[in-house]
Amino acid sequence: MPPLPRRLLAVLTLSALCPSAVLRAAPVVAALPPATQRVVFLGDSITQGGFYTVCVEAYLRTRHPASTAEFINVGLSSETVSGLSEPNHANGAFPRPDLHERLGRVLARLKPDLVFACYGMNDGIYLPYDEARARAYHDGLVRLRAAVLASGARIVHLTPPVYVDVKGTAPAYAAVLERYAAWLVARRADGWDVADIHTAMARELAAQRTRDPAFTFARDGVHPDERGHWVMARALLRHLGAADLPDTLDAADAFSGVPAGPEILKMVRTRSGLLRDAWLSAIGHKRPGKPGPPLAEAERRAADLEKQIRALQASVPAAAKP
């Protein structure tokens, strides 16, 4: 039998000598794969809105203050991975952007080590389930995965968030996203890395509605509020190994007990939005809208924010660092 790893041997020895010490041990925190230097988030308007991406970044910064990993959110509103669009999308102003039109440029310009991709909400174009539309979604994800892996990066797929038919216009669409999520989870058997945020959101929604039947994460049925984004972030972080997150719906609870946690969360949010808008414009896309600031200007401003964030991270007492 090969010798036990030193960390495991130490834990077993400590548990034998002092079982209560193991019970008091710090909970396991989430971590990125080794050697990850650049993380890119891809997705539609929910990702572009970005609070879940900010929570993930801020968590990893506060738990691993020595890490130099960079996070860039380039989610794009209205986008699909399927290439589908409603005939009169945006009142005929423009069709939904197709991720694959810009994906090559994203990978070439940003050179990520790790990609988090969250698609599905727009991919069934808010219609009842249809095999052809589902196949377009599946094929789009396969193409996305192949392109990311060919670039040398890793990819974690996120199942689509939940849809709630608050307007009575798409009563069958929640079931469509359930099927899309189930298809993605089943790909784990094929070696795909899939974080199931859909199930986490659905369970939390059901639990909250036992106390308040009118509870919802999204007033329009699509775009989660900060509580919904936190549930998404929490599910992703738990997928990455976090065992130190509270079950409350307030993201602040995950940062209030960490030195400088709330300040880091706030500054990460500002920096993330600044770079997101600049990189979206620099990379280019097919969705009309206000362009972001010039990339060089955004990077200068982001560098100043980064210095401030790093100073806050350095101020965390050694005993408080995982």
Image (spheres, helix red, strand yellow):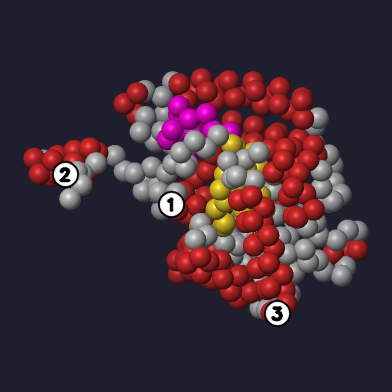
Question: Which residue sits at x=17%, y=50%?
Answer: 1
Q: In this view, does 60 lie to the left or right of 98?
A: left
Of residues 25 and 226, the one nearer the viewer is 25
Q: What number is the disc on residue 130? A: 3
Residue flagged by tag 3: what amino acid is it?
A: Asp
Q: Point out the frontmost of discs 2 and 1.
A: 2
* Residue 210 magenta: no
Question: Which residue sits at x=18%, y=38%?
Answer: 10
Residue flagged by tag 1: what amino acid is it?
A: Arg
Q: Residues within 10 Å of mark 1 (few under 14, many from 20)?
A: some
**Residue 240 picture location, percent across and down:** 45, 49
**Residue 300 picture location, percent across and down:** 71, 22
Give the residues in magenta.
Answer: 59-70
Residue 48, compared with residue 142, is above or below; it is: above
Q: Give the residue pinned by disc 2.
A: 12
Helix, strand or loop at label 1? It is helix
Quadrant housing residue 322: top left
Q: Give the residue pinned by disc 1.
A: 238
Quadrant housing residue 94: bottom right
Question: What distance separates the C-alpha of mark 3 from that of mark 1?
Answer: 32 Å
Q: Please say whether residue 211 is visible from this viewpoint.
A: no
Q: Is residue 110 left or right of residue 186?
A: right
**Residue 91 picture location, percent across and down:** 89, 64
Question: What distance separates the C-alpha of mark 2 from that of mark 3?
Answer: 53 Å
Give the farthest residue toward the front: 1
Question: Which residue sits at x=88%, y=68%?
Answer: 88
